[in-house]
Structures are given as C-alpha cells and as structure tokens.
Image: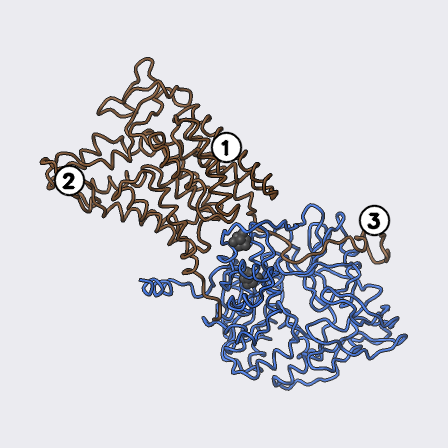
Chain colours: A brown, B blue
Amino acid sequence: MVSRHPQHTRDPQPILLPEPGTLRLGVAPFCHGPAGVSFISWTFLVGASVVLLSGLILFGWPVIRVAAISIAVALLAESVFSLLTRRGRSWSESHALLIGLLFALTLPPLIDWRVVVWGSIVSVAVGQNLGGGLGNYTWHPVALARVAMQMLFHDQVTRAEQPVLAAGHLLWGNLTRGRPLPALQTWASAAPPAGTEAWIVPNISETLQSALERVSPSSSSAALAELIRDRLPPWPEAIAGLGGGAIGTACVLASLVAGLLLLWRGFLRWPMFLSAVLAAAAMIFILPLHVLSENGEITHFWLPGAAVWEGLPVGLVYLTYQLTAGEFLLVLVLLAPDPTSSPLTTRGHIRFGMVIGIVAMLLRIAVGVPAAGYWALLVANTLVPVINRRTRRRVFGT
Amino acid sequence: MGGISIRLNSLFRRRRSFRGGLYLPVRRDLAVPRGIRDFPDPPVLCVPMIQHDGPAARIVVQVGQRVQAGQVIGRGEKPDSLDVHAPLAGKVVALESVDTVRQSDVPAVRIATAPPVAESSEPSMALASTAPLTIEQLAELADEAGLIDFGQSATPLGRRLRQAATERLNDLIINALDFEPEPDDRNDLLDTSLDTIISSAVRLRKTLKARRLWLLVDRYDPHRVRRCRAAATGKPVRVLGLPNKYPQTHPNLLTHAVTGQEPPYGSSPARIGAFVLAIEALLALENASLHRRPLTRRLVTVTGDAVRKKGRYLIPLGTPFADVLQHVGLTGPVLRLIEGPLLTGRAVASVESVVTRQTARLLAVGRDHDYLANPGPCVRCGRCQDDCPVGLDPRALLDAYERGQIEEALPLWPHACLECGLCSFVCPAELPLSEAAARLKYLIPLKVQW
Ligand code: SF4
Ligand code: SF4
C-alpha cells in the first residue's frame, strides 16, 4: 500500500506500509533470553568435549573408539524411540548426543566395546525415555547407566591399575604398550624404555582407599604421609590426569574448565558447586581411614584431615587428593547441573549439592563403594521432589 | 539449623532489591537520540473515546462542527470515564468507531485538522486558580485533563489520587527508573526537566500530605544520581539510586525497595501508605494543575530495527500509526508492530490503529529481528521460578491453566503475578508462562482467595 498522505512525509521515497492482515500478532514477550533448550544441550556438549579432548591427549585413539560407539548407539537408540513413539523433537538428537558423550567420559579408555554399547542403550532407553522422557526423567541417565554397568561389569569399568600414555607419546602413543611405572618414580621423571608408550599406574581412588598398613595407631599420620609420598603421584600430576582413570575423570583441570564454561553460561550454579565441595571436604576431614595395625587388627583413624606429621599438614594434602580423585568433580560439573534432574531453585541447588558431597564421600570412604559419585548423584536426584517442596519460595506479599 | 540460616539470610539481605528478577540485556539497537524530535500535525485524527481502563466518554460534538485544540469532544460522565479533548484544531468529519490496540470498535471522532483560526488557542481547561489544591480538586483536574497512570496500568490518575486520599500516606514515591534498559525515556526526561520534576513533586507532596518524598533514579549512572542529589538539596526530597533489575519499576517492588514492606497479597502500595507515580505522570499532572492543560499529545518513543528516524516524538492523540510510520520512515518491511515494551507490550493488528494515552512506545520490527516462540516440553530447569520477582511457580500455573483446573491454581497465589513477562523470557522451552499466569489472574476473582 503506497502512502496515503504523501504531503505528510519529508522522505522523497514513498514507503511501503504493511498491508492489512500481514502484521504478526501474538502475546508478549516479543523477545527471549539467550538460552533455548538446544542451546543448553550444546553448551554442555562443548563442556564435555573439552573433557573428552583431555582424555584424548592422555589416552590416545581408544578414546575416540569409546566415544564414537557410545554416541552412535545413543543416537540410534533415540531415533528408534522417536520412531516408536512418534514424538521426535528437534533437540532430542542433541540431547542424545550429549548423553552418549557424557557416558563415554565415565568409562576407562580400554573398555570392552560391548559394555559401551549396553551402557549407552541403558542410558538413552531406560534412563532417558523409560525414566519419563526428555525433560521428565528423575535420575540422570548417564549416572544410572554408569551405576548399572558398574554392577554388571565391575571388573571392566573399575581397575586397580590403569594405563596412561608416557611422556613423549601423548595423543599418538599406543595405550596397550604399557608397563608399570617404576616404584618411587613420577610420570615426569621416569623415561619410558624403548617399546613402552604408556605407564601403568595405580588408581588413585583405590590407593587412597587401601588400608594404611602395619602401623601402630599412634603413627597413623606418619603412615598417611608415607602413602602420599610414596604411592601417589605428585598432586599437580594427579590433577593434570597423569594418574590415569576414566576418560573424563582423569584430568580434573579439564573438568574445571568445562565448569567455568557452564558457570559463565549460568547452567552450573556456583552455590551448588560450592556447597557440594564444602560438604565433601567436611566428610573427608572427618570420616575415618582404615588402619591395618601390626598385629593384624583393623582400626579407624578418625579426623584424618587434621593429621599433622613433622609439622606438615598431611591431612589437608590427603583431603585435596581425595577431593580431586575419581569421578566426584566430573559429576559435579557435567552431570549434576543437568536441568531436568536437579532442583528448581538456587536454594534447592545448595541442598542438592550438599547431598551429593556428603553421600559421595560417605560411600567412597566409609563404605568403599566404587564410583560413589554416580551413586551420590542418583541419591540426590531421588531427593529432588522433597528438596523442591521444601525450598519453595515465599510469594511476595503473603 | 533452619532458623539460624533464615536469620543469617535476613542479616545479609540487600534491603534495596528483591529476590529473583533479572538484569535484562541492554538492547543498544533500540536506543534513540536524546531530546524530543518534531512531529508534524497529521491531516486526520481519529480520537477514540476510551484510552484507559474504564468506560467510554460520551461524544459531545457533531459532524461538521469546528473544534479548537483542547476543546472537550467527549465527556466522561460515568465513574472512571475520562474527558477526551480535541488534540488539534479542525473540523469533525465523522463519528465512527476505531480499533485501538487494547479494544476494538471504540467510538471515535474523526477530525480533519486545519490550522487554528486567528486567535492563539493554547489548549486549556476552564477552571483556573492558583490557590493550593486539595486532593479532591487535584483528582478532579486530573480527570478533566484525561490523565491516566502512565505506569504499567492505565487506571485514571484521579481515581488513584482519591484512593490514596483514603489512606494515611507515608511515602510518595516518584519513579524515574526505566521499565527496560533501552530506550531510556525516563533518564532523558530526568535530564531535561529535573527541576520541574523536583518542584512539582514537592508540591504534590504538600497536596497529598505525604510524610516522605522519594525520587528513585537508576543507580547505573552515578553522575545522574549526583545531579539529582544536587538538585534536591534543601528540598524535602530523598534521592535514592536503585539498581534497575527488571521488573524493579513495578509499584509494589518499588514500595518494597523504599519502605522494606510488601503490599499484602492482591493489594496496591496504597494499602501500606505508599503512592507510586512515574515522572511522566507527574509532569502531566503538573501541566494539568498548574497550566490547566489537558492531555492532548503523548510522548511516544518510536524505535525498532525497521524504523529509519528513531526518536521520541510528541504525537497528537488519535494519530494513526500509519502516519507515524510515514513520518519516521521505514528501512524495510515491517513484520510486527508492538505498542509498549518488548516484554509486556501488545502486538498491533493494523496500522489504522491510533496513538492513545496509553501509547508510550511504538516498535516496528523487521523480518530478521522478530522473535516467534517455539514452545517445547518443560525441561524443569527452574529458571522461571528462580527469576520470578514475586516467587511464583509459573510452571505450575501454566499446568493448571492448560488442564483447565482453575481451582488447582488457587493455592498458587496467581494474583501476586506482576505480569512482567520475565518467566516466558527466560524459559528455555519458550512456554507461554506469563500469559497463563495473567489469564489465571482474570479467571480467578481475588475475593475467592480471601
Ligand atoms: S509474569 Fe508473573 S509469574 Fe511470570 S515472572 Fe512475572 S510475576 Fe512471575
Ligand atoms: S523455565 Fe520453562 S523449562 Fe524451565 S522449569 Fe520453567 S517452564 Fe520449565
């Protein structure tokens, strides 16, 4: 429609007003915040990819194998489900992709492919779809699948000794050409002999769990100091991932980078992270270590966090090792913030984090459950409805 | 344990803000140049008889009659109806009905504008006196001038003044915070008319017999806050810089920020002795009471990616949007025309709709900048609950609304909703949460709850 009042405008060109009936209607708001559902999935995916990359550097190509199988099976399972239920969603693929990738991160690099396939199917089919479907499941699908695999194939998923590529062979090395790291040597100081491309190192979590041997209870601190000095890698090596572990749990630094990304995007709520870490630290500080005394009795060494040996706070060192060992931080950063299986409000998230921290360390230290972090997440997921009910906000003016 | 944590919370609570809410991203693309730009008189006006929340005025002119600028053309005779004035001199060419953005088929007077005949006719209302006014007189003047509350609602200002008169007034709160960060109309007004604002606020305080007078400004620009403080020295005005977290400008939240008290559920700040007025309403009231000028033009901010000459224009009421767009020019096809802010405004159905007293902003959105919600299932992320400024559970409200279980919504306090639109804005699943909350509010009468 050309201008009705050409004399009214100083614009030399007549402007085109919208035709009647062509204006778009609808209700406010007419703009939207940055985060859509697929944006959430993709941000988590980027975070998970950072962690995957760290695994790739530490363990080489077997990581690609595990991730590829896991993701492919997850996508396949999701498509089958979408076909069966005819409710395909544009973002269900990116979510399945995320589930597949996250599940791969929880596995050791040299795992049997059948375990990967089963786990991936369980996470998508049982955890996500039978668990209530997208946006509705109670338990985090990945934690559920990981715990299921732990129970079915314990020896496959948790090993007392695990390989990590040696210096000079990172990324390209062959993980199967490994030999045990010589005693009293660190990853950085040991030079791999010809034909060796990887070191087989003891699992840090398991080492921390093992009883302090042949000490009289009075010198438990000394035994703890000895354990840390002789049987654990230096802490910087441990958090860089050189102490080995699962693809995603080895390198704590990568998890923290992913955490920063999610924090920046607002998907990881720092109060939750903080409350979980503080709760876990408190548990580690208090919960007793098992001590095997010289006469063969097992006694408890309470408050290990307070242990001091020759003026050194070995207890606090033990605490930092315990906090950064195993799956705990990966769970906190990439699994716990999942919107669907976490509480609604930030106050709820604080309690949620506390539950994860307490249960994870209780199971790990007091009960000795492997993969305690995943169990703790499942427990916390179960409590979400209760937490939601108890952290409902007071309505303004009531 | 719980008790301790609650007490600690209140210790650390920032009194001047509220829980939830969000600092909206600043839309620099919507910013407009400072000051008021010229708007030429349109050839034809179509002045609707309802431009507020209330019944229509009765048309008191006939076809063919000449009218002067400021002459009454519609008389508000029923309670809550307001007088309507001819914005410009001209001749009545038709009595018809027009669709405004909020209502359809509103009786209207079509005026072919013409330059005023000989003598200058500054629009003015009959009554004139310089004696101090009582609240009742002020309310009367506001009704005669056709003033409305320029905040989120369009209640007649006279009615609000009368309401305030029935309660003991402790705090008179003059709000200069902008509804959304851009365009910052109130900041602009503050920069150009600070002294007028302060002097008229002081006068209003006297009339309303309020104990304290507050001027709330955005804390973001410390220079402006300092300038306001300097202008207020020696006057009974307290200048308060507030962080403009959306939707801080809602009267209930402002009252809470100032007094620390919350208006009880379903009631307005008047219940706790507070009266909130936006600065544009204050200036209009000043115009009516001091200069006896009716409201015949509205300061409209025209912006949007499709607009060529963005700016603030003083537009006569009844100007068709088509003429507005014609004057400001377009950079391309308009896909959506929005009257009001992005988060709470309304989509305009036709460019034949006209500017009313409620039109504060007109946004023309082109093809590439429009947002169309694509709702999916809720992912239980909790953003809606966390960011809701009043602590509602919009998800549960939507659920109750969609299933038609209205009584389920009763314990969810729907009348606390401020209709701020924030829940829909943050929802990653793009669900129509605020719409459901607002609709429930109208489906459930307040007294059922009480
Ligand atoms: S529109 Fe209502 S329910 Fe939604 S955030 Fe605003 S106040 Fe809360
Ligand atoms: S913001 Fe949207 S997706 Fe998130 S809980 Fe609320 S309704 Fe569900």
Q: Could you say which disc has been placed on residue A13 in the image?
A: 3
Question: Mark 2 vs mark 3: which is more N-terminal?
Answer: 3
At 81% from the left edge and 50% from the top edge, which residue is drawn? A16
Residue B416, quarter of the rendered image: bottom right
Question: Mark 1 vs mark 2: which is more N-terminal?
Answer: 1
Question: Mark 1 vs mark 3: which is more N-terminal?
Answer: 3
Label 1 sits on a secondary structure element that is helix
Is residue B382 placed above or below A244 in the rendered structure? below
Is residue B330 placed above or below A177 in the rendered structure? below
Q: Is residue B335 left or right of residue B67?
A: left
Image coords of residue B268 (percent x, y): 55, 74
Residue B344, quarter of the rendered image: bottom right
Look at discs 2 and 3 and give the one toward the viewer. Answer: 2
Whether labels 2 and 3 belong to a single chain: the reply is yes
Identify the image quadrant of the N terminus of chain B. Answer: bottom left
Q: What residue type is labelled 1?
A: Ile
Alpha carbons under labels 1 and 2: distance apart: 45 Å
Image coords of residue B405 (percent x, y): 58, 64
Q: Name the residue under label 2.
A: A298
Residue A251 seen in the figure: no
Residue count near mark 1 (Cα–Cα under 10 Å), binned few <14, some 14–19, many ≥20: many
Q: Which amino acid does label 3 sit on?
A: Gln
Closer to the camera, B228 or B133?
A: B133
